[in-house]
Amino acid sequence: MEEAAVEQTVAERLQDLVIDSQDVNTFLADLCEFAAASVSASLGQQVVCAVTLSRHRRRSTAAWSSPDARTMDEIQHAFGEGPCLHAMKTGTTVVVRDTRTDPRWPEYGQAIAAQGQFSLLGVPLTLDQGATAALNVFATTPDAFDPVSVQSAELLAAQAQKAVRLAVRVGAGQLLAGDLRAAMESRTAIDLASGIIMGQNRCSQDEAMTILVKASSGRNKKLRDVAEQLVAQFSAGPATTHFDV
């Protein structure tokens, strides 16, 4: 199939995702699954994807292709830095060849490596003014992304950003507070657990996250599960997020 025909097929598929989605969250989740399948086919190995979308200077929603991708995204946002956030801020593609040795975000890289993800690709999506987004692709092997696969991911992102812009415009007339609520609640347990560790150990947030990640790796449990167990020790029920209505 010629390249132009492939691009048209991708564009049509993404447009269908927008039309068929009930809200922005649903669309982004479908986009993550589509991107994961496309990049996996291109690389010849399984990858997982996450998308973060920030609107009006507030990180409003995130989506994932799998539970593992969700964990990777939550770790990045808990640290407050990483390839996806850098791609969003600078508008440039970020390639992490080996999360264990990359010097740019060493603590984040070690946390991701502890979860079994050894290379990473962050691709920005250009949106309307006041909105930014990025696609994160995680692979379980080091140096998974060669120049050809990076270019393919960037082409996919170029097509996806058109669909995201459309979804955001459509979503502007919907209850976007629901998207924000879902995104915030997904990170509450990790944020609260990090705060508890900071209070107990009189340490920084990065140090608290490192402790939490080591506990997750040592117990062979999901980071979110370890966080929820810690929070449960200090509360009568599961972690919840409170909003002013």
Image (tube, rainbow, N blue to C red):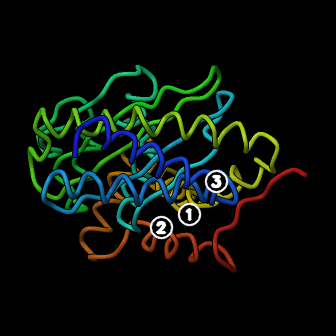
Q: Which residue is mark 1?
A: 189
> Would you place residue 213 above or below residue 135 in this image?
below
Q: Position of residue 120 (x, y in %)?
A: 23, 44
Q: Residue 227, labelled with which disc?
A: 2
The residue depicted at 20 percent of the width and 62 percent of the height is: 116
The residue depicted at 28 percent of the width and 39 percent of the height is: 153
The residue depicted at 54 percent of the width and 52 percent of the height is: 28
Mark 3 vs 1, N-terminal side: 3
Q: Which residue is mark 3?
A: 19
Question: Position of 228 compared to 201: left or right?
Answer: right
> Around disc 3, counting alpha carbons within 10 Å, would you say few (fewer than 14), some (14 to 19), or many (20 or more)?
some
Q: Which amino acid, mark 2?
A: Ala
Question: Position of 46 compared to 56: left or right?
Answer: left
Return the residue nearer the eye: 131 or 244.
Answer: 131
> Around disc 2, counting alpha carbons within 10 Å, would you say few (fewer than 14), some (14 to 19), or many (20 or more)?
many
CB atoms at circles 2 and 1 under 8 Å apart? yes
Mark 2 vs 1, N-terminal side: 1
Question: Position of 176 compared to 60: left or right?
Answer: right
Q: Report the mark closest to the observer, 3 or 1.
A: 3
Mark 2 vs 3, N-terminal side: 3
Q: Report the mark closest to the observer, 2 or 3.
A: 3
